[in-house]
Image (spheres, coloured by chain):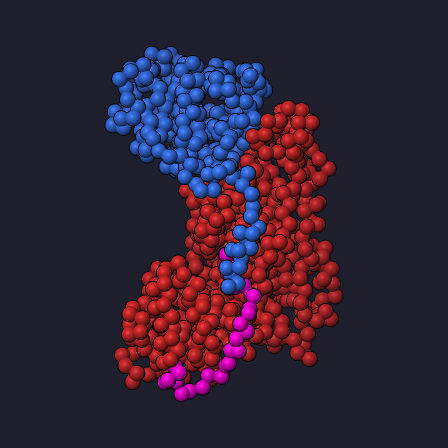
Amino acid sequence: MVTINDYEGGETAWCPGCGNFQILEALKRGLVNLKLEPHQVLFVSGIGQAGKLPHYLKSNLFNGLHGRSLPVATGAKIANHELTVIAIDGDGGGYGEGCNHLIHAIRRNINLTYLVHNNQVYGLTKGQTSPTSEKGFITKTTPEGNFLQPLNPIALAISLGATFVARGYSARISHLTKLIEEGIKHEGFALIDVLQPCVSFNRLKTYKWYNKRVYDLNEDKEYDTSDKTVAFSKAQEWGEKIPIGIIYTSEKSSYEKQISALKTAPLIKQKYSMAKMKQIIDGFVQ
Amino acid sequence: MDFSFLIGGEAGQGIQSTGQILAKTLAKGGFNVFASQDFESRIRGGHNFFRIRASNKPIHAISEEINLIIALNEETITRHKSELKKNGLIIHDSGESPRILHPSPSFWIPFEELAIKKAGNKIMRNTVALGATLCLIKLDLEILTNVLRRVFADKGIEVVSKNIQAALAGFNYVKEHFSGTLNPYFPAKKESQLMLANGAESVALGALASDCKFMSGYPMTPSSGILHYFAGKSVDMNVVFEHAEDEIAALNMAIGASYAGARAMTATSGGGFSLMVEALSLAGMTETPVVIVLGQRPGPATGLPTRTEQSELDFAIYAGHGFFPRAVFAPSTPEECFYLTVKAFNIADKYQIPVIVLTDQLLADSYSTSSAFDPAKIEIDRGEFLSKSDLGAIGKYTYQRHQYTSSGVSPRAIPGNPYALVVTDSDEHTQAGHITESAETRTKMVQKRLKKLKGLRKEIEVPRGYGPKEASTVLISWGSTYGAMREAVDALNTPKEKVRMIHLSEIWPFPRESLAQQLKETKEIVVIESNATGQMAHLIKAETGISATKSILKFDGRPITSTYITRNFLEEAEN
């Protein structure tokens, strides 16, 4: 029986009070609740404070390049769809450097869980503006304040017809644990945007700021996650009240379910046929 | 007997498929065939042509002189008239009536009218031209009709029979109306077992025969043919092709699939490879085997998209930040595309490194006959893997992906097995694969990765020699210029003058000792390559200290031919 101890990893290098500790805790609990053992799980992460997370627990890990976790995770999932694959980035990697991959991973609806630690600031490179920073945010790269409109990942994902779109808040560990479990169980691409305070570089979005504003959307039993119009309007809600929970779901066949080669077994278990190969080459002779 | 054809027309007129059918027919007739394509970066209009050379002797390149021009438009005649050999012929149906004739030697055949009359569709006019051609070279029409049956089998019996009628109409028209002479007689050898494939198809076949399970890619000339062929066989062979959103994703996906245990590759051209460079370095750092085909075309930037050049040798060898071992192979023929792709996979797995297969437009789009590729000859070497019982024996979850070893190669494990966690990182990492900043570990890890070079160097074949050993003049070529060089060396060797050639297909790690050995006691070294700066000449100098006497270069986007080499060699000699 898998326990939380099985997932205990090495020493962390995050700032004290960082929201990442809570996300790490939620992840471990979610994996244990789903009875997944460390070797059944593959984490793929990029570069940034979020990308370090899988080093601090036990599992398979490919920690790749900044912004490129999704294509590596996609390749690995296609090669062995029996693995539970979780990709992790921050808002810089996920919504900046790698945003093109996010768009196409949603279109592909490949069965991955994508966790984006969204603290609206660059942490590892020490406090520059990020794709989700609000307008006017003064940083070392935006001394006159950020001129750019923040990217809305929830609205973006819904507009692309994503099949699972959720938002968590790091300080609500039990709630986030549930979202992670639902995301992993979902047959298709699951985006979980996680609001997370950065105690070193974002003095605006503090725990206090979020605690006053977030509310669990799914507590309203009338809320229908399959209603795209309602979900899209909820995605715009930001400021005095910020919804968290499962915001949108839709039914679509996952990418790997549609590929002929993966119908009978994972790709890595398919046997090479020399007879078929010879037949193909014969076609060039006759 | 050595005979060259040129089929010319606009983009959209079916020049490529017509050329392929004629090339296949000649190969099936028992001849050695070499064919190359020249096309513009457009879908309609412009001027495209397909050259085919057929001979009963081994041939290695196209010929600049043409015996028969099959002109599907007027422009083909004006453009290529001067390339016609003495006693050559142009067949065409340009002009409004037979009275409007081109100066001799040309022969008017109403391709379109016959197609409409005999096959009910003017689209069959190319097939009329093929039938006419078969009559002119006195090759058995049945060989062509058999090829038509196979090529159009998927399109149904009606398309097949109309094509056959069109071919017959062309054949009969020549039989009845042509009174001139065209020398050749192509005596068919019915049971030819030669295969005819182009470079792109041969790379894809090599990948399939290597048990490559996953290919990702973003279309880019001249490598799209590899993607198309592999994707087309994915259902048959139980493999996956993924059309990635960009080249960055393409290589990262291949790395992900390879990490998870599947042999994986991607194929692109220079622009796409530029986007892949960061991931190339990632493969080096995470020690993930991967094969990357870099199909060269003239740059910089978009350059001449549909044409050829050998200007990415330096790029292939040095691309990527930080140092990591790699191998670079540049096959010379479609046949070598097949076997070197197989070797690329084996080397990638054995040393857990990225391997680059350097082709170019000339090679990707050129067809040549060879004996059939033999999958039974291939040995698939996946390198060192720990089995479940090995992993169980070392203790649950104690496996270290980047363990120090004397060879520098750490045995792999497949993620998902119950005994091991497979951890790797693009950051410098510990033996267990976790991020570290330890100076000691960093030093050891750099040394571990470097150690692989020792074994890797031994895998590189001695450069191939050809021509009289006593010749003190050596011509050096690499990659796709092999065929033109072979023919140039044959042409240049006379009782008075002796030259030999050395050809490099396995280029990196550079075979410095074996090449230096071969160049001992050489008076003159001429390096022939399709680029403007002589990259191979520089590489030879950097790796062996030996300077080339001169370089023969070409960088107009068109292939180097044997006559180009002999002309430049002799002119230089005279000066």
Task: Answer left or right for B33 relative to B98.
Answer: right
Task: Examine the rendered structure and indicate whether residue B364 appears above or below residue A73.
Answer: below
Whether residue B268 is visible: no
Quick one: A60 or B47, which is closer to the camera? A60
As for residue B75 lying within the magenta part, the answer is: no
Residue A71 lies left or right of residue B121; in this view the side is: right
Nearer-the-camera pick, B165 or B496: B165
Q: Which is more toward the observer, B168 or B381?
A: B168
Counting labels gives: 0
**In the figure, what tint was chain A given?**
blue
Tell me which residue sits at (71%, 63%) in the image. B519
- The x, y position of residue A252, in whole percent, is 35, 33
In the image, the chain rendered in red is B
Residue B218 x, y percent position in the rendering = 44, 47
Judging depth in this view, the residue of A254 and A119 nearest the camera is: A254
Residue at point 36%, 80% (across, down): B173
Q: Residue at x 45, y 61 (%)?
A: B307
> Residue B122: x, y in percent?
30, 69
Q: Which residues are magenta?
A: B174-202
